[in-house]
Amino acid sequence: MSDITTRRFALPTGVELDVAIAGDAANDAIIFLHGFPESHRTWRHQLAALADDFHVIAPDQRGFAASSKPPALGDYSPDKPVADLIALADTLGIERFTLVGHDWGGAIAWMAALAHPDRIARLVIVNAPHPFLFQKTLFDDMDQRAASQYITAFRNPGLEMFIDSIGMEKFFDTTFEKHADLAKVGAEKAVYLEQWSQPGAMTAMLNWYRASAIIVPGMDETPERPAFLSAPFPPVAMPTLVIWGMEDKALLPSQLDGLEALVPQLTITKVDAGHFVPWENPEAVTNAIRAFLAAPVPA
């Protein structure tokens, strides 16, 4: 089994990222992007399982764990981690790669696939909504709108003060209790608490939500619809696997409805899991990725 090592890279985007790496650099590369409120350890099972056959790379994205935490809100707009991704691939000498993303990492993966189809050979999305469908359902699907009200709470500038008042451990318990089996978190709880306690980490992580342009209407609001919802949206160019934990309480299965019109080369694998699929049902995720990568790319 290939050993997983952690290296720190200073990127031309102005940040330093800690990156877990394993496998032979001569093998096909897979870059894994985690989401909130995690780190590269989201993918600990997949990195270990796939490293013998692939060159696997998983950064702690900007704002998370011990990676750089730029001070400005604008440093967390989605184009910035997309640029980090491409800069990391360039630094490692990787021209084309499979991109895998979960949660916010999946949102960045969707955007990177749309912006850089020349770099991304295949795309794997794990419980992360397509940007068009997510914004559309926030207007048209009241269940999804209700499930997403936490985003408004995360954008509240007073949230860090509230977390300080209740303590990080209490925030941990309330963050995960509705979205994961706490028994499956196990010893990782100490890892989360250590990473969240890094100076500036909580604000940096929450800034991903605050810097996003996504509109989350209140339950009694009817704001003007974004113009892009009424315009053609570019298709995703590469073969795409979407793995979905069907018990996700934050991102509902409605995120799969109509996805095939936006992703012509689409495979969907439904998994018995909640939101944190990569470690709630790791074998199902790893097996789905293996099968997807073993299939020939359509001509």
Image (cartoon, grey):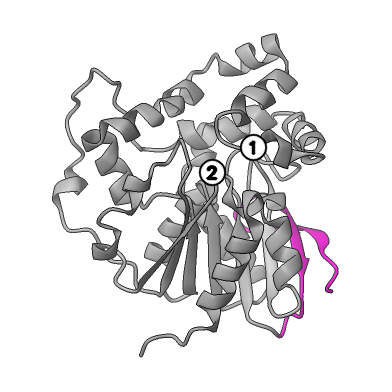
Residue furthest out toward the front: 272
Residue 88 locus on image (x, y percent): 63, 64
Q: Earlier in the sequence, mark 2 or mark 1?
A: 1
Q: Amino acid at mark 1?
A: Asp
**Residue assigned mark 1:** 181
Secondary structure type for disc 2: loop
Q: Amino acid at mark 2?
A: Gly
Which residue is at a point 27% across and 30% down the rendered structure image?
142
Which residue is at a point 32% across and 46% down the rendered structure image?
254
Secondary structure type for disc 1: loop
Residue 135 locus on image (x, y percent): 29, 41
Whether 23 is drawn above or below 227: the answer is below
Quadrant position of the N terminus in the picture: bottom right
Q: Which mark is residue 274?
A: 2
Is residue 174 in sight in this rendering?
yes
User: Over which residues does the magenta segment extend?
Assistant: 1-26
Say whether marks 2 and 1 touch (CB < 8 Å).
Answer: yes
Residue 121 is left or right of residue 252, and the answer is right
Q: Which mark is residue 233?
A: none
Is residue 11 in sight in this rendering?
no
Out of 5 and 81, give the one closest to the viewer. Answer: 5
For label 1, the crowd category at 10 Å Cα-Cα, with few meaning under 14, some 14 to 19 and many 20 or more, is some
